[in-house]
Amino acid sequence: MGTTTELLTVDEFLSRLSHDEPVELVDGVVRPMTPTGGAHGLVCGRLVVLLGRALDVAGQPSAGVVFTEMAAVRLFRDRESVRCPDVSVVLAARLLAGGLPTTGALTVVPDLVAEVLSPAEAAWEVEEKRAEYLAAGVRLVWIVDPRTRAVTVYRPDAAPIRLTRDDLLSGEPVLPAFRHPVGRLFDGLAAQ
């Protein structure tokens, strides 16, 4: 699709969407997503697996769904914006009756979002996303930095918490039983 100067509605954006290049729609403007690398892919993949395991309890219906950055999310009904969080979780209680739509953007605001920083991602872009997620009602935001091997945790109306290698990453209040050593998220990455 590429970057355009023309303002688009969400419906126009979704009808023109191509998977040739990852893009988001922010207030009607198409923005390319920052190129990622191996560290980004490794950490995102690890988070998808860990969160998926936390949601699937043996013998029980799934407690929710984990999405990758290929799932477009419409956070606000009154804005022409579509975001693609690196990893997100929607708990079963908030999923639409009858299942998820097969086309279009998700209209359920995630309960948890994880953004894994890309080497070329600007600080203002990350801050803009984080603020939008919390304003839309996301209850837990993780900003994961493979370079510093740290995770900053954001919850509404609470001070951010920066976790490093020896700390435990908690899924509270979304997934209270989820606990994982921060350092293990980055296993396999080259030393800095």
Image (cartoon, rainbow, N blue to C red):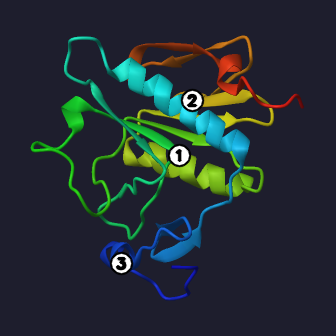
Q: Nearer the viewer, mark 2 or mark 1?
A: 2
Q: Position of residue 102 (x, y in %)?
A: 23, 57
What amino acid is at disc 3?
A: Thr
- Mark 3–mark 1 distance (CA, rounded to whole Å): 23 Å
Going by the image, does 134 lie left or right of 168? left
Q: Which badge, 2 or 3, comes first in the chain's sequence?
A: 3
Res 148 seen here: yes
Q: Is residue 68 left or right of residue 2?
A: left
Q: Residues within 10 Å of mark 2 (few under 14, many from 20)?
A: some
Give the amino acid type for the residue marked by disc 2 in the picture. Answer: Arg
Give the mark, 2 or 1, whose residue is nearer the N terminus. 2
Name above or below for residue 178 compared with residue 6: above
Q: For residue 9, which numbered disc appears in the image?
A: 3
> From mark 2 to mark 3, how far is it between C-alphas?
34 Å
Which amino acid is tagged 1?
Asp
The residue at 41%/39% (across/down) is 138
Seen as rendered, the residue at the extreme right is 192
Q: Nearer the viewer, mark 3 or mark 1?
A: 1
Q: Which residue is mark 1?
A: 86
Mark 3 or mark 1: name the one nearer the start of the chain: 3
